[in-house]
Image (cartoon, coloured by chain):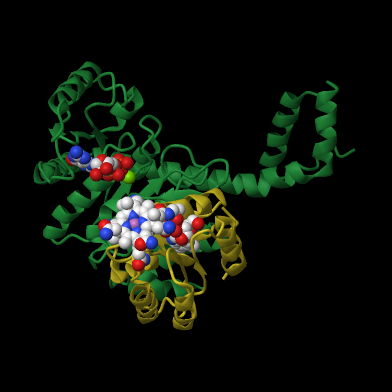
Amino acid sequence: MRQDFDDLLTKGRAGDKRAVARLISTIEQGGEESRSLLTQLWPHTGQARIFGITGPPGAGKSTLTNALTKCWRASGLRVGIIAVDPTSPFTGGAILGDRVRMGDLTLDKGVFIRSMGTRGQLGGLSPASAGAVHVLDACGYDLILLETVGVGQSEVAVMETADLVLVLNVPGLGDDVQAIKAGILEIGDLFAVNKADRPGADRTANELRAMLELGEEEKRSLPVLLVSASQGTGIEELCAALDTQYQYLDESGELAKRRSLRLRSELLTLVREGIEQHLLQPLLDSPTFQQSLQQFQARKESPYLWAAEFVTQIKIGGSGCELHES
Amino acid sequence: MSEKKIRVLIAKPGLDGHDRGAKVVARALRDAGFEVIYTGLRQTPEQIVEAAVSEDVDAVGLSLLSGAHNYLFPRVIELLREQDANGILVFGGGVIPEEDIPGLKQAGVAEVFTPGTPTSETVDFLRAHCGGGE
Ligand code: B12
Ligand SMILES: Nc1nc2c(ncn2[C@@H]2O[C@H](COP(=O)(O)OP(=O)(O)O)[C@@H](O)[C@H]2O)c(=O)[nH]1
Ligand SMILES: [Mg+2]
C-alpha cells in the first residue's frame, strides 16, 4: 500500500491528475487507508497558500473562482480547487454543479478541480475537504481554493481549514446585507461585492463597510472590493488585495497563529475519533451498558455518577466495561 | 463515510443545447443517493474526460439530442482509454435512433436510454454496474 501511495504522490507532483484524483478518493473513503496516506503526506504539506471563498448561493463564488484562477495561472502558480455543494440529508445524494462555471479551467494542466458533497457535515465543507487540501498541498499546488456551500451563515468551518477567507456578497438579496449574517462577517479577511455590473452594488459595498466598522474598532479596516466575476472587472485588483492580505497575515504572525490553531483542532478531531472508536464504542456495545441504561431509566442509578466512574476507570487503565459487572 | 458513494459525471458533449433530459437524469440520480457532477452545456470530449478523471467518477453519462452521438460518444471512450481510465463506465441517453445503438455498444457504450425510458431504469442499471466496490 505504502509503495502505492508513493507512486501516486510522485505522479501527482508531476501533474498527473489521475494520481491526484485517486489520492483524494482514498481520503474520501476514510478509515485506516486514509490515515496511513495522510501520515505519508504530512512531511510534504504546509507549503501551499489556502484561500477560502464563501458567500450566499448564487453570489458567483464559482464564477469568481474561475476568474481568480486565470489570474493566478497568468503568474505561473499551480492552483487546486475544492468546490463543495450540499448533499441532500434525505437521500444522501448531491448534484455538484460548480464545474459549470469553471469550464475554462478544465483543460489547464496546472489546475486541478474536485467537487465534493457536504455528506452530512455542517459548516459548509465536506468531511474530506481538509484531507483533500493536504493532498493538493503535497502534490505541489501553490494555491488551494476552497469554495464552500453557499448557505450564507453557517460556513464558519472554512475558517478552520483556510489561511484566509474571502467573503462574497451581491446586490439585491433583500434588506441591506442581511444575506450575510454576523458570523460570516467575522470570518472574513477580505470582502468583495460581485455583480458590480448590476445596479446597487455600490450601495451594498457601502453598507458592508459600515457594518464592518461597527464591529471592528481596534483592528485595521478590512478591504471591501467591487468585482464582476462574469465580466472580469476588478479581478486583478482582488487578486492583488488577496496577496496583500496574505502577506499582512504572514508578517503580523497571524498566519502562524491560525495554522497552529488548525493543527490543534485537527489533532483534537483525530484523538476524539480514536477515543470514540476504541473506548466509547466497546462500552456502548457491551451488555452491561444496556443493563445500566435500564437502571438509569428506573432511577435506580445515576448516569452522572456512572459517567464519572467510567472516566476514573479509563484513567487507571481499564476499559470502563468492568463497571457494575457484579 | 464507510459505504462508497457512487459518483457519476453527467455531461453534454458538443454544441447540443437541449439540457432538460440531462437535468432530469441528474436529479433522478441525486434522489437515488448518487453524487452527480454536472458540467453544463457544450463540453468537448477532452473536457469531459479530464473532468471524469479529476473527479474520479465511477461512470460518465452522456446526453445528446442533436444527432452527433455516433461521433461524440465513441470519442469520449477513446480518450478515456488514452488516459488509462477505461475502468470508468460510459452510458448515454437522448434522441438516439434505435439502429444506432448496436454500433454505440460496439464502441464501448454500456447502455443507451432513449426518450420515454423511466429514469428508475438508469438508477437500477448503475446500481448493478457500479455498486459492488469496483
Ligand atoms: C424541448 C425541445 C427543444 C427546446 C430545448 C430546451 C432545453 N433547454 O432543453 C428548444 C426549443 C430550445 C429546442 C431547440 C432546438 N431543437 Co429541439 N426539441 C425539443 C423536444 C421537443 C423535447 C426535448 C426535451 O426536452 N424532452 C424532455 C426530456 C426530459 O427528454 P429527453 O431529453 O429525451 O431525455 C430523456 C431521455 O432521452 C433520457 N436521457 C436524455 N439524456 C440522457 C443522458 C443520460 C446519461 C441518460 C441515462 C438518459 C438520458 O432520459 C430522459 C428522461 O427520460 C425534442 C423532441 C423530442 N420529442 O425529443 C426536440 C428535438 C430534440 N429538437 C430538435 C431540433 C432540431 C432543435 C433545433 C436545432 C431546432 C432549430 N432548428 O433551431 C434547436 C437546437 C437547440 C440547440 N441549441 O441545440 C430535434 C433534433 C433532431 C435530431 N436529433 O436529429 C428534435 C428531436 C425534434 C425533431 N423531431 O426534429 N428544442
Ligand atoms: N450579472 C452577473 N452575473 C454573475 C456574475 N458572476 C456570476 N454571475 C452569475 O450568477 C449565477 C451564479 O453564479 P455561481 O458562480 O454559480 O454562484 P455560486 O453559487 O456562488 O457559486 C450564474 O448565473 C452566473 O453566471 C457577475 O459578475 N455579474
Ligand atoms: Mg458554486
On the question of residue A255 being in view, the answer is no
Quadrant location of the C terminus of chain B in the rendered image? bottom right
Q: Position of residue A48 (x, y in %)?
A: 26, 55
Q: Colour of chain B?
A: yellow
Q: Position of residue B61 (x, y in %)?
A: 44, 64
Furthest residue to the right?
A326
Q: Position of residue A179 (x, y in %)?
A: 32, 26
Side of A163 where A244 appears, left or right: left
Q: Residue at x 81, y 42 (%)?
A: A322
Q: Is residue B28 above or below residue B134?
A: above
Q: Is residue B61 above or below residue B28?
A: below
Q: Quadrant of residue A256?
A: top left
Q: Colour of chain A?
A: green
Q: Residue at x 38, y 35 (%)?
A: A155
Q: Is residue A153 above or below residue A52?
A: above
Q: Quadrant of residue B39?
A: bottom left
